[in-house]
Amino acid sequence: MKPMKIWVVNDDGIDSEGIKVLTRHAMKFGEVTVIAPVEQCSGMSQRLTIGLFEKGKVKRKIKKVRFPIKGVDAYAVDGTPTDCMIIASEYIPEKPDIVFSGINHGENAGIDILYSGTIGAAMEALVQRIPAIAFSLKWEATDYELVDREIDGIITALLEKKLPRNQIWNVNFPVHKPSEFKGILWDRVPSQRRYGNCPQDPADVENSDRVALDEGYISIGKVTNMALVP
């Protein structure tokens, strides 16, 4: 059986700690290629560069770079997370079996899903008919201890679950240490709160992603791209 091919992308930039952590874990599941922005691109949603191609050639710069994890090909793109996905589809001959986006420094939950470049890159994967999972860690977290302990099991479980082609998995890790961690909550829906410490909206519901994070759970939910046929 051929090994799974995985593309790892993010919006925090190719030098971020989160993409290194995600790549290290992704390598346990297949052959990994990293394609990420040169610079921080948070909050860009699914923004793309108009005129990305000119006469069939990429106008934005893509450069193969050294990555601090052995055995990983890595490319830095002078563009947005969505640009990374579009350029990779032209530049890399074989499409992946799945895209992992993240690990974002800051949760992508609630209304802020709309603004997320991490989610945007995963949505662009869907446009290209590639399944995708987005991973994020609550902003206040200072290490990846909980991520390192739990992410392999989560990836294993999600790879066994099939979604319609217009949905991605959205995984958010809380700030809590492993000793304070309460478990994993599935089928979380987007909270009605914006990013940060805004007060809970009266319309917020107990099965929302932010409520799960606040209470020390990993939140796993689905995000749907309504423009794509399920």
Image (spheres, helix red, strand yellow):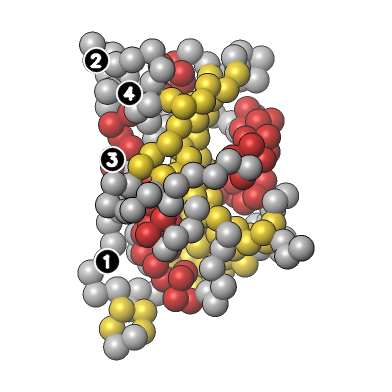
Q: Which residue is mark 3?
A: 114
Badge 4 amino acid: Ser
Type of amino acid at the residue the image marks with label 2: Ala
Where disc 1 sits, the SS reads loop
Report, in whole angstroms, how far the alpha carbon at label 3 lies from the one at label 4. Answer: 12 Å
Instruction: Spot the residue most to the right.
Output: 1
Q: Percent position (x, y) of residue 130? A: 48, 58
| Quadrant into which the N terminus falls | bottom right
- The residue that mark 1 highlights is 49
Residues at marks 4 and 1, CA–CA distance in whole angstroms: 30 Å
**Label 3 packing within 10 angstroms: few (<14), some (14-19), many (20+):** some
The crowding category of the residue bearing disc 2, from other C-alpha atoms within 10 Å (few below 14, some 14 to 19, many at least 20), is: few
Q: Circle 4 sits in a helix, a strand or a loop, which is it?
A: loop
Say few, some or many: other residues with alpha carbon within 10 Å of mark 4 (under 14 / 14 to 19 / 20 or more): many
Q: Nearer the viewer, residue 39 or 191?
A: 191
Q: Is residue 198 above or below residue 122?
A: above
Image coordinates of residue 127 in percent, x first then y, are 37, 59
Q: Give the mark, 2 or 4, whose residue is nearer the N terminus.
A: 4
Q: Earlier in the sequence, mark 3 or mark 4?
A: 3
Q: Where does label 4 land, which residue?
A: 191
For the residue labelled by badge 3, is the local secondary structure a helix, a strand or a loop?
helix
Tell whether 209 sits left or right of 15: left
Give the number of callouts.
Answer: 4
Label 3 is placed on what type of residue? Answer: Leu
The Cα–Cα distance between marks 2 and 3, rounded to whole angstroms, is 18 Å
Q: Residues within 10 Å of mark 1 (few under 14, many from 20)?
A: few
Q: Which residue is mark 2?
A: 203
The label nearer to you, 2 versus 3, is 2
- In the image, what residue type sits under mark 1? Thr
Q: Residues under labels 1 and 3: Cα distance?
A: 18 Å
